[in-house]
Image (tube, rainbow, N blue to C red):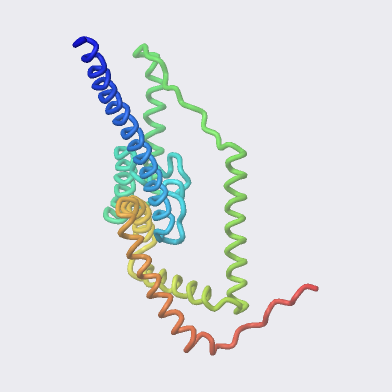
Amino acid sequence: MAEHKEEPVLESVMDKISEKFHGGDSSSSSDSDDEKKKGSSSASAAEAMKAKIYRLFGRERPVHSVLGGGKPADLVLWRNKKISGGVLAGATAIWLLFEVMEYHLLTLVCHCLILSLAVLFLWSNASTFINKSPPNIPEVKIPEDAAVNVALTLRYEINRGFATLREIGHGRDLKKFLIVIAGLWLLSVLGSCCNFLTLSYIVFMVLYTVPVLYEKYEDKVDAFGEKAMIELKKYYAIFNEKCLSKIPKGPLKDKKH
């Protein structure tokens, strides 16, 4: 009789233990489901916040994609520091050679050609006496497709510049007129302070350092740019209301019927 009484007690204890285990499993699974939902909701919220963040010049893609991607973008963004540093050192050496040491371009080209041709000529003639193979001089040719593409691109950009100047000359866009005048005046000031080579080197340094710094401090620069654009729009609205709106505009384009 004692054995029969102990059996239901053991069975009830085992049932309670199994219920606890199953309850724990279900609670853990529900917790994991809740964590997944929270993770997905937080990810969507993060994406929404990224979409609302102001980007400079209305940029929607990463800086690497804006620069065209590939090796040129890697070079400008210093993905390979050795290659980018070598390019920077080469440009600095050229600037020092022509600007500081006052070396002339034609003289440098002639001296380099004289040295290269003398070395190759002596090497080719001396190879028979020293029992070594003559130098392998590669055949260099400019591909026709590349030359045509460069010419077409250059032609398109020049024509677009002429069209912009013609539109500004007609007096239809006062804002663009002021921007172009300010840009040309700034270039004239820079040209009076330094020569063309130094100006080219300054532009190269800006284009070679600003993108990588902007990519590093992207959020801070975008936040500052947003505030600056708000202030500029306010001042431009005031200037437009008091001055620009009172200036008579040029003749409008003939409407096509």
**Count of marks overlaid on the render:** 0
| Up/down of 221 relative to 103, above or below | below
| Residue 207 figure quarter | bottom left
| The C terminus sits in image quarter | bottom right
Front one among 44 and 176: 44
Q: With 160 as the anchor, is 119 left or right in this view?
A: left
On screen, residue 87 above or below 218? above
Compare residues 77 and 114 and report the one nearer the observer. 77
Residue extending furthest toward the left: 2
| Point 38% across, 25% down: residue | 122
In the rendered image, residue 163, in percent from the top left (x then y), is placed at 62, 66
Instruction: Check the image and name the residue furthest to the front.
Output: 1
x then y, percent, for residue 77: 36, 46
Q: Is residue 123 left or right of residue 16?
A: right
Residue 187 shown left or right of residue 144 in the figure: left
Point 60% across, 84% down: residue:
249
In the rendered image, residue 223, in percent from the top left (x then y), is placed at 34, 63
Q: Position of residue 36 (x, y in %)?
A: 37, 39
Quarter placement of the N terminus: top left
* Residue at image point 31% right, 33% down: 28
Query: Up-down: is 113 above or below 253?
Result: above
